[in-house]
Image (spheres, rainbow, N blue to C red):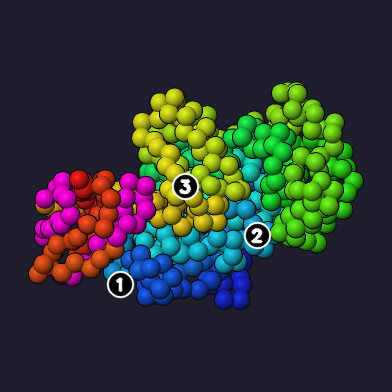
Amino acid sequence: MSKILLSLSWAYFIGLSFLAAQNLISIEQKGSLTKAELAARFQDITNNDVELFKITYSTQDVFNELDTASGLIVIPRRTAPHSYPRLVFQHGTVGSRTDVPSNLRGGYEAGLFFGGLGYVTLLPDFLGLGTSRGVHPYVHADSEASAAIDMLHALDDFANQMDIVINDQLFVTGYSQGGHAAMALHREIEQNSEAFTVTASAPMSGPYSISGIMRDKITLDESAYFYPAYVHFTIVSYNYVYGLYDNIAEVFKPDYVPFLQQFLDEEISLGGLNDALISKLIQNHGAPIPKYMLQDSILNAVISDEMHPFNIALRDNDVFDWKPAAPTRLYYCMADDQVPFQNSVVAAEVITQNGAPNFEAIDVEPGADHGECVEPAIIATAVFFAQYWEVSLVANREPIPNIPVSIFPNPTTNLITLGGLLTATQVEVFNALGQMALRQVVDPADATLDLSSLPKGTYTLRMQLDGGVGVSRVVKQ
């Protein structure tokens, strides 16, 4: 990528000038939170203070022209300097250009959570959002990946300017559209990038099968779907990238075009568009069934002609037919009302058939809808990543390891005793789905933990110790 000479100043931007051959353009501090403040937000699941920074950086748009993208970086801070792993969190669908992590919106709270756990967390705004120009290429795999990769390159410059030490680990995750974007990023790094290596990946509740599950949901399903704006957003996005039509009236029926044009002109948000489309679909058809927005000729062509340009564009953005080398988990919820859970099921079948060495898809809470699935999926991701997470003191660069904690008896029926505790220690117990099943402070004078309230199964215990992070497993019979 070509890079340009830039020298910028700003009000309360960090007072720095940048030299040639860097793709970091600017840094703006957006705030900070203490460990206590994070603990209040996230039920005591935190290890660090954090600082928040908006950055802008150079990248290429979908037409290979130089653009300025933006994103949020969350930095963990401790009293003694540490070296931290990187984590990319790809955000979900947002309502407008300004509803993005760098503006402390658009799902930025996930960055706080992972930053508090001890990851230097990057949240790209994506192309066409934040400072980037043009239309947002929604669920466009290549640009979701490239915006994140260029932000990772910009992180090197950022770390040098801000005196932050980062280790070689890289974790990738994201929710909803961000699940699709996380899968796209992981695939791109493993197949085409020599600069980075993914340590572990956990896409969550993403539309991985754009040309299959998602297309059929829109073109064949007669049931109500209360998110018709996603259909419009996808079609507009792919037209922007692939040039599928000359005018939206070629694709959508006249009753819906005015609302769609208002969204294109950024006069209404995605939520406003969705409300208007639902109202008009109910008025015209008795229920919000998205396929009735489409011109019959387009609908029939997409259903019958696999080589129609729309179908080619959809297939180009599927992200499930590959073989991840890094440990990978897909987290989802079967009752998801926005992104059908079959996306994860189909992806799991294909990735497993392709021979991925350490892969699993897990329904973290079967009864949860799309919004309710966020918390259990993110907690499951945190537990999964904790198996690989490494932090070291900068002074000696020795990693703070995952320390096995002795447990006996193991297997057990109810009570277990934890060996080696020196101080009162909070123990978190997670079930096989990554859900927190129990949290309790254990006193070293007693050092017992009662699991009688938990059903039979295998559980992971995690605790913060002076020498590192204690991680062990126990089987309850």
Which residue is at a point 50% across and 52% down the rendered structure image? 368
Which residue is at a point 49% across and 50% down the rendered structure image? 367
Question: Residue 24, image x and y in percent?
Answer: 55, 57
The mark closer to the camera, 1 or 3, is: 3
Q: Would you say 306 lies left or right of 197 here? A: right
Mark 2 touches mark 3? (CB < 8 Å): no
Residue situated in front as seen by the camera: 463 or 137: 463
Cα–Cα span, label 2 and label 1: 33 Å
* Residue type marked 2: Gly
Q: Provide the secondary structure element on which disc 2 rests.
A: loop
Residue situated in front as seen by the camera: 28 or 416: 416
Q: How many marks?
A: 3
Could you tell which of marks 2 and 1 lies nearer the N-terminus?
A: 1
Residue situated in front as seen by the camera: 256 or 247: 256
Q: Which residues are magenta?
A: 409-438
> Which residue was labeled with disc 2?
130
In the rendering, which numbered label is found on residue 79? 1
